[in-house]
Image (cartoon, rainbow, N blue to C red):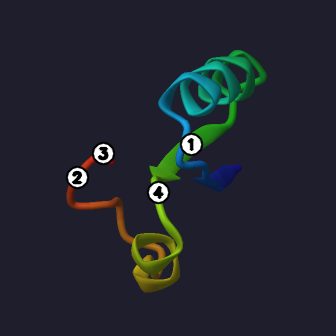
Amino acid sequence: MRILLFEDNQQIAQSLTDALEKQHYTVDRAADGKIGWRYNGRPLAEEV
C-alpha cells in the first residue's frame, strides 16, 4: 500500500516514514500542502 505523508517537520517525517516502511508501506512525502495536493499518483519529483 502506498501512503502520501504531509509533514513539514523533517525529523517527524523521517520517523513516521521509517515506522511505516517497517510495516511494508511505500511512503511518498510532501513537506507542504501545495506539493501534496499536486500529487496525483506519480512519484514525487523531489523528496521535500
Q: Marks 4 and 1, how far apart in space?
A: 10 Å
On screen, 42 above or below 30?
Answer: below
Q: Marks 2 and 3, how far apart in space?
A: 4 Å
Q: Crowding near pointer 1: few (<14 within 10 Å), some, many (20+)?
A: some
Name the mark on residue 47: 3
Q: Crowding near pointer 2: few (<14 within 10 Å), some, many (20+)?
A: few
Q: Residue at x 40, y 72 (%)?
A: 35
- Of labels 2 and 1, the one closer to you: 2
Q: Residue at x 44, y 76 (%)?
A: 39
Q: Crowding near pointer 4: few (<14 within 10 Å), some, many (20+)?
A: many
Give the quadrant of residue 27.
Answer: top right
Horizontally, is 40 left or right of 47 in the view? right
Q: Secondary structure at mark 3?
A: loop
Give the quadrant of residue 43.
Answer: bottom left
Residues 11 and 22: in front is 11
Horizontally, is 9 left or right of 25 in the view? left
Name the mark on residue 27: 1
Name the mark on residue 46: 2
Q: Secondary structure at mark 4?
A: strand
The kind of residue tagged 2 is Glu
Residue found at the very far front of the displayed protein: 9
| Label whose residue precedes the other's in the sequence (2 or 4) | 4
